[in-house]
Amino acid sequence: MRLVSTNSIEPGTTLGQTIYNDNGQVLIHRDLDLTQRVIRRLLNQGITYVYIKDELTDDIDIESPISEELRVEASNTIKETFSEMRQEGFMNNSHILNKQEKKLTDIIQQIMDQMQSNSDTVSLLADIFVTDDYIFQHSINVTIYSIAIGIELGLSEKELSEIGTGAMLHDIGKVFIDQKILQKPEALNTEEFQVIKEHTQLGFDFLRKQLDLPLLVAHCAYQHHERLDGSGYPRGIKGDQMHKYAKLISVADVFDAVTSNRVYRDAKLPHEGLEVLYAGAINLFDKEMVEAFKKSVAVYPNGLTVKLSDGRNGIVSKQNRHLCDRPIIRIFQENAKEVEPYEIDLASILNVTITSCNLES
């Protein structure tokens, strides 16, 4: 399968992956030949890029870090939990989280188990869910990325479970924010942004009262927008004042935020999201966490068309574990001429690098 920009797709192109809504229901089946109407529907849903099928890439696999069934179960549980809490309001809903706590714990354990048994690097580009409420899928994505970082750091099962729970609930305070502000398609004004920032305090105040949850989970909600240089919120704490779980989740949170489709901007590709993290690795984010993340995520995901520093063009066909910015490339063009496809491994050819990406179909 090949990763392409949605607005470059020609009618008749075959979709390479199924697209779901946030209830896990199929919106568009894989193997469908796309019409102009369906392409326009994808664009209207804010889907920036998709996988398509073509002869050159038919054997390139796109693997999700968790099963389709688990993703749907997690999505439905988060949606049900957060939606009920939103309806009940801040003061009247402690019983809802208590009721759902075992479901959430089971889901996090399943995510941990599947990711620990999967040696592939993490790529969520194959998991396209169309949702009216970003918080649901964002919570799951941040959980997956956070657990991936924790596994790379060699954390214990207990620590991974706590991080997973903290990541799943890190944005729970947004449940209590005015939805008109939360889902506003335009840029927020100063007053609206101050309201949004309150979600960290609201999440902390709510979670610290939950007797069945570790207090560290509440601190994940409280601190995930703090930054090492003190420029974050809500308290502006610095460095070692931040708990390591919050440092970890902040990396996952920012990466998913910039690589997800939003109503007010297109998603960045993974290597662009990593550049955002590296730009802040000195002052904003913990460098060890960023490095662990880099080793865990597919920086150049399978199916992505790339240009190399020696002028050749190719498609990422496989990943090199722990060397995620140096994948295996299927070359199809040299000196602007088509050639019989062959593969090179950037892990063993260190004088060649990826210089740009191409999403044209």
Image (tube, helix red, strand yellow):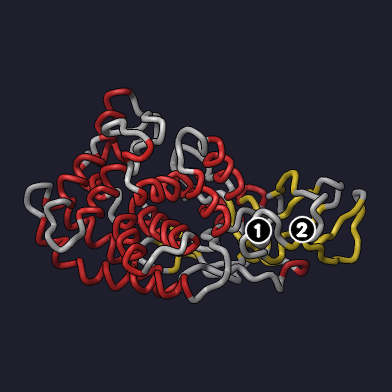
Which residue is drawn at the image coordinates 46% and 43% (left, top)?
Answer: 286
Which residue is drawn at the image coordinates 52% and 51% (left, top)?
Answer: 47
Q: How many marks?
A: 2
Q: Name the side, left or right, on which 244 lies relative to 211.
A: right
Given the image, on which type of amino acid does mark 1 rest?
Answer: Leu
Q: Position of residue 153 (x, y in %)?
A: 47, 59
Q: Name the side, left or right, on which 196 lies relative to 185.
A: left
* Quarter occupied by the N terminus: bottom right
Instruction: Depth check: give the residue in front, 200 or 193.
Output: 200
Say which mark, if any, is on residue 52.
none
Q: Where is 55 relative to 240, above or below?
A: below
First in sequence: mark 1 vs mark 2: 1
Which residue is drawn at the image coordinates 55% and 57% (left, top)?
Answer: 297
Q: Position of residue 251 (x, y in %)?
A: 45, 47
Which residue is drawn at the image coordinates 32% and 57% (left, top)?
Answer: 168
Residue 37 appearing in the image: yes
Q: Residue furthest top?
A: 190
CA–CA distance in space, label 1 to label 2: 9 Å
- Crowd around label 2: few <14 · some 14–19 · many ≥20 (10 Å): many
Q: Helix, strand or loop at disc 1?
A: loop
Q: Where is 78 relative to 46, above or below?
A: below
Residue 260 appearing in the image: no
Do the numbered discs 1 and 2 sit on residues whose CB atoms are within 8 Å?
A: yes
Say which mark, if any, is on residue 346.
2
Given the image, on which type of amino acid does mark 2 rest?
Answer: Leu
Instruction: Depth check: give the residue in front, 191 or 33.
Output: 191
Q: Helix, strand or loop at disc 2?
A: loop
